[in-house]
Image: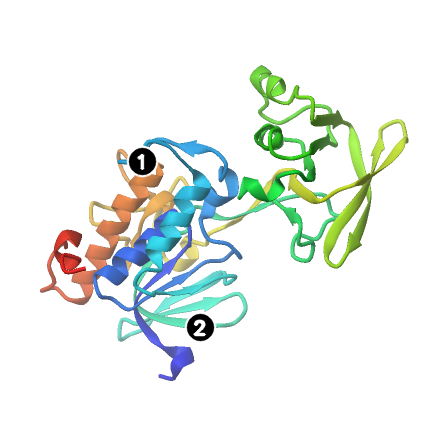
């Protein structure tokens, strides 16, 4: 095979925290590893939904933000140089007579692998924002709150009808010069009394029933927005950065098309994280079994089991597990 058709020992579908740790552990087990992520960013739901929030249920980490966890998991995943591909949605998986898996993506590319590990979660999530913004072209319009320091002293506009937007505004209140929080609805999804108290701050300008009517740009950056009240009154605001969160769309992972047995939209598995197709394994939120917990830590543990199972599938004489204290003792 030429380089484009290179055969890998393990191909991981999904670049969330579970998929990233799977890539690290697979490389650690000296398997030629590829990871395919459908979106333009790594970190999955942790990166998308709570980068600014602290997580306390990871062993030996007494509190870290989602962004910190993702960044460290990416650093760990790339230690041993697995191949990582982004912006490719796997549509079809076919197992050939010789046991090789052909993975075909939506853009027509084919990947070849001896085993497959599903770390997809339930699918690809996309945050929805006002149609006048272009999340691919507008460089200062984002749907995730990361690297808070980049907003220091800035004029930040948030368009959100969700509790998430309220939490973003509260997180930026002591960093940004001014935070505008605009909601096209009359209330916020999933908001509690506590959330409204969070945004009662001097530099948070919160308004509801507000519509975005015009966007001004300069060099692929939004520099101004025109917003309209329900009364028809309009206001032009100069802005430095924009955050959007007006709901979520999800593209479902086609598990059944891949020959998987499912329950509650997840892939059924056993203690070896094996699926009903020999050579295919599963880990993280994509998996379901009795007693399953959907935690970051659970995904890491399942990733190790899936990788060890893939290793023994390819080499029945391989050890059931390894110890990093032995592997890295001379380093």
Q: Percent x, y for residue 201?
A: 66, 21
Q: Percent x, y for residue 282?
A: 31, 51
Q: Residue at x 71, y 44 (%)?
A: 240
Q: Pick whichever, 21 or 237, lies toward us.
A: 237
Disc 2/disc 1 C-alpha distance (Å): 39 Å
Q: Residue at x 26, y 60 (%)?
A: 26
Question: In what quadrant of the picture does the N terminus appear?
Answer: bottom left
Q: Pick whichever, 241 or 94, lies toward us.
A: 241
- Does the rendering let one see residue 118? no
Q: Residue at x 30, y 72 (%)?
A: 100
Q: Pick whichever, 28 or 122, lies toward us.
A: 28
Foreground disc of the pair 2, 1? 1
Q: Percent x, y for residue 207?
A: 75, 26
Q: Percent x, y for residue 7?
A: 32, 75
Quarter of the image where one finds residue 297: top left
Q: What residue is pinned by disc 2?
A: 110
Q: Residue furthest front?
A: 153
Q: Is residue 33 above or below residue 98?
A: above
Disc 2, SS: strand
Q: Residues within 10 Å of mark 2 (few under 14, many from 20)?
A: some
Q: Pick whichever, 23 or 328, lies toward us.
A: 328
Q: Residue at x 59, y 27 (%)?
A: 170
User: Could you tell whether 213 is left or right of 190 in the image?
Assistant: right
Q: Residue furthest right?
A: 232
User: Could you tell whether 255 is left or right of 182 in the image?
Assistant: left
* Badge 2 or badge 1: first in the primary sequence: 1
User: Could you tell whether 109 is left or right of 199 in the image?
Assistant: left
Q: Residues within 10 Å of mark 1 (few under 14, many from 20)?
A: few
Q: Name the mark on residue 120.
A: none
Q: What residue is pinned by disc 1?
A: 61
Quarter of the image where one finds residue 331: bottom left
Disc 1, SS: loop
């Amino acid at each position: 095979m030429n380089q484009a058709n290179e055969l890998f020992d393990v191909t991981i579908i999904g670049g969330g925290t579970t998929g990233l740790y799977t890539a690290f552990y697979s490389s650690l087990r000296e398997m030629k590893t590829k990871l395919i992520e459908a979106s333009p960013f790594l970190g999955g739901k942790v990166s998308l939904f709570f980068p600014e929030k602290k997580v306390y249920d990871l062993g030996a980490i007494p509190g870290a933000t989602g962004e910190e966890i993702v960044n460290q998991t990416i650093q760990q995943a790339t230690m041993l140089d697995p191949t990582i591909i982004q912006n490719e949605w796997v549509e079809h998986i076919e197992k050939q007579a010789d046991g090789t898996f052909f993975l075909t993506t939506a853009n027509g590319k084919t990947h070849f692998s001896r085993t497959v590990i599903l770390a997809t979660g339930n699918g690809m999530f996309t945050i929805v924002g006002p149609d006048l913004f272009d999340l691919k072209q507008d460089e200062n319009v984002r749907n995730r709150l990361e690297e808070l320091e980049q907003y220091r002293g800035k004029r930040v506009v948030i368009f959100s009808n969700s509790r998430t937007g309220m939490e973003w505004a509260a997180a930026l209140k002591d960093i940004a010069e001014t935070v505008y929080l605009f909601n096209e609805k009359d209330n916020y999804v999933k908001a509690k009394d506590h959330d409204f108290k969070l945004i009662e701050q001097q530099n948070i300008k919160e308004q509801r029933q507000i519509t975005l009517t015009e966007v001004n740009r300069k060099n692929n950056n939004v520099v101004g927005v025109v917003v309209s009240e329900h009364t028809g009154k309009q206001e032009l605001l100069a802005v430095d950065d924009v955050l959007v969160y007006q709901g979520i769309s999800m593209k479902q992972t086609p598990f059944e098309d891949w020959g998987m047995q499912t329950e509650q939209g997840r892939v059924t598995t056993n203690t070896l994280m094996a699926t009903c197709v020999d050579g295919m394994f599963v880990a993280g939120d994509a998996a379901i079994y009795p007693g399953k917990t959907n935690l970051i830590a659970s995904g890491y543990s399942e990733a190790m089991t899936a990788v060890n199972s893939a290793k023994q599938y390819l080499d029945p004489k391989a050890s059931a597990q390894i110890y990093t204290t032995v592997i890295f003792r001379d380093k």
